[in-house]
């Protein structure tokens, strides 16, 4: 099995020149950058200047679909798009999207920062999204 990179050991921004490079004595593009209100370590990449939390880049580690694509799909869900619509438009199976959503909900605190900062999702929309997962579809997305 491949060794899993630990949180904060690489830049998760795919557009970054130092994307995925593990930190070492020669490779030091990441710096600690405060903590979220929930106390999750935040990092900043000195190459692309993007900030991200400890778990960003690891939750979906090993998935075939790029993290950005998964997060964007989640953001569109939070904005009220139906899973069936997103499945059609983005070409992912509904089951796959649901699986991402369930995994994301387990890491809700860490993902909120990214979804709000990068994808401009509002807190209320996120709360509704997590509530939707908890109710396993009993409640409809707004
Ligand atoms: Zn970077």
Image: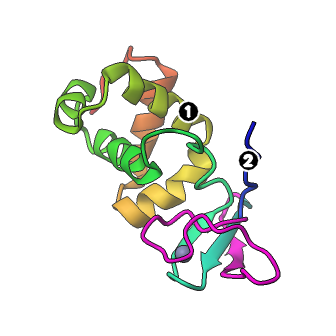
Ligand 1, seen in the image, is in the quarter at bottom right
Start and end of the magenta stretch? Answer: 9-38
- For the point 71% across and 64% down, the residue is 8
Q: Quadrant of the N terminus?
A: top right
Q: Is residue 18 magenta?
A: yes
Measured along the vertical axis of the image, is residue 54 above or below residue 74? below
Assign a secondary structure to mark 1: helix
- For the point 31% across and 24% down, the residue is 93
Q: Is residue 17 magenta?
A: yes
Residue highlighted by disc 1: 103
Q: How is the image coloured?
A: rainbow
Q: Residues within 10 Å of mark 1 (few under 14, many from 20)?
A: some
Residue highlighted by disc 2: 4
Q: Quadrant of the C terminus?
A: top left
Q: Residues within 10 Å of mark 2 (few under 14, many from 20)?
A: few
Across and down, in percent, residue 12 comes to: 55, 62
Across and down, in percent, residue 99 comes to: 47, 26
């Amino acid at each position: 099995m491949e060794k899993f990179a630990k949180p904060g050991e690489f830049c998760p921004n795919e557009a970054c020149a130092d994307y995925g490079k593990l930190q070492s004595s020669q490779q030091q593009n990441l710096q600690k950058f405060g903590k979220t209100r929930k106390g999750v370590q935040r990092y900043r990449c000195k190459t692309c200047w993007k900030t991200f939390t400890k778990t960003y880049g690891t939750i979906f580690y090993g998935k075939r679909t790029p993290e950005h694509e998964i997060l964007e799909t989640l953001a569109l869900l939070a904005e009220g798009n139906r899973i069936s619509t997103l499945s059609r438009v983005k070409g992912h199976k509904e089951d796959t999207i649901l699986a991402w959503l369930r995994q994301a909900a387990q890491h809700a605190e860490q993902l909120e920062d990214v979804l709000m900062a990068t994808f401009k999702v509002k807190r209320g929309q996120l709360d509704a999204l997590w509530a939707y997962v908890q109710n396993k579809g009993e409640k409809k997305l707004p």
